[in-house]
Image (cartoon, rainbow, N blue to C red):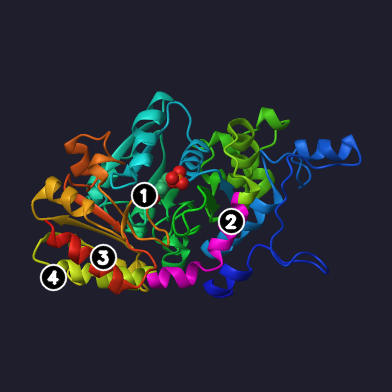
Amino acid sequence: MNQLHQETKCIQAGYTPKNGESRMIPIVQSTTFKYDTSEEMGKLFDLEAEGYFYTRLQNPTSDYVAEKICALEGGTKAMLTSSGQAASFFSVFNICSAGDHLISSAAIYGGTYNLFAVTMKKMGISVTFVDPDCTDEELEAAFQPNTKLVFGETIANPALVILDIERFAKAAHAHGVPLVIDNTFATPINCRPFAWGADIVIHSTTKYMDGHDATVGGCIVDSGRFDWLAYADKFPGLTTPDDSYHGVTYAERFGKEGAYITKATAQLMRDLGATPAPMNAYLLNLGLESLHLRMERHCANALQIATFLQEHEKIAWVNYAGLEGNRYYERAKKYMPNGTCGVVTFGVKGGRAAAETFMAHLQRIMIATHVADARTCILHPASSTHRQMTDAELTAAGVGADLVRLSVGLEHVEDLIADLQQALAQV
Ligand SMILES: *Cc1c(COP(=O)(O)O)cnc(C)c1O
């Protein structure tokens, strides 16, 4: 499957019906699974056999879809979660516990920022945020003896900073820790972080993957390349026996390819239960089947709109990596030669107040706390998603108080430009 084109994987990966079975992935709407003997069931509980026993841990519908995303990313094993937040949390908590430390790019999604800076801190896990464009020396200085991973976003939401994945991977590997990349905005259609050295990829599938504003969900994919046993003392959860499974040592039993996701499923899903509903996994799969076509149009529409805005007299600035002259234009060409995403940010001349007037007059473009779906929508992060952050934190995260985030959808681009034009005329 990994040799096929991404387009073919979007349609066919993850599920191959056997003779007489349903062509579409079946929705296995069942909490439990039946076995003939207690002994067979016992083997599942000991992780000695593969199979389903309770949907909180694993469900066939979700696994078909995880398998498809795994193929798209070029990984070895993947799991779905009930949300992108759960994927972010699990990706860290699977290898960090109280007393540990992680390094994160400061330009990340607001929810992830809160998760790391506030909630994980309460759990005794500390974080150092670094400017994604910091010098090598600054990045180096962020590492501590208890650092367990490095985290960043391919395209930061909403700062639209493009991460130099290769550089961050090298730094992480020099310290014997993995690089976790949130690839939500780029999707595996536009960027495959594993090709640039990332070890774990996560997604909020709520965005382009679902693409229709229908389901909240997440995914974690393992490249299968990080050698946990080579740094055994850093990752005891993977390299020493788990008493809650009769002493299984994940890295030994399941190898580099399977240890990380098996542990996250067997321990974190079991204990924390951030399980997607089978129906949601089914809907996500519908979205994935057209992901390759949709990404192309999202990017084409966004580039046209970014160009229009850049030339408009009432617009102070436009940020879109596809625009020549953008700070990240060259880096985007390297990591995402076919386009970045459909999200454009800009400032209206006159700041916060002008932005509010402009947004109030939009007719077809809706105000919504969302991005990356078929319908064009718009948001002012400083007064919504990022309102917990101080002005200094906002600036550090690359989200100025005047920033407007426009998620360009799949409508005809001329209708969108006409709407922007009439609303800007009211400012
Ligand atoms: C939305 C988003 C998340 C959180 O995902 P949910 O599905 O809303 O929980 C994480 N990372 C990025 C980049 C996002 O855009």
The spot of residue 272 in percent (x, y) is 58, 32
Q: Are marks 1 and 2 in contact (CB under 8 Å)?
A: no
**Secondary structure of residue under mark 2:** helix
- Whichever of labels 1 and 2 marks the residue nearer the N terminus, that label is 1
Secondary structure mostly taken by the magenta-highlighted segment of the chain: helix
Reading the image, the residue beneath label 1 is 152
Name the side, left or right, on which 285 lies relative to 246: left
Disc 4 is placed on an element classified as loop
Tag of residue 321? 3
Identify the secondary structure beneath mark 1: strand
Q: CA distance from mark 3 to mark 1?
A: 17 Å
Q: Position of residue 11 (x, y in %)?
A: 60, 70
Q: Is residue 310 left or right of residue 331?
A: left
Residue drawn 25% across and 35% down?
Answer: 389
x, y percentage for residue 309?
18, 66
Tags 4 and 2 touching, CB below 8 Å: no
Residue 311, label in figure? 4
Q: Residues within 10 Å of mark 2 (few under 14, many from 20)?
A: some
Q: Nearer the viewer, residue 338 or 278?
A: 278
Q: Amino acid at mark 4?
A: Glu
Closer to the chain start, of discs 4 and 2, is 2
Determine if residue 415 is in view. yes
* Earlier-in-chain disc, 3 versus 2: 2
- Compare residues 302 and 248 and report the one nearer the observer: 302
Q: Bounds of the magenta span?
A: 280-297
In the image, which disc is placed on residue 283?
A: 2
Q: Residues within 10 Å of mark 4 (few under 14, many from 20)?
A: few
- Disc nearer the start of the sequence (4/1): 1
Q: Say which of 27 and 415 sits in front.
A: 415
Q: Is residue 368 left or right of residue 277?
A: left
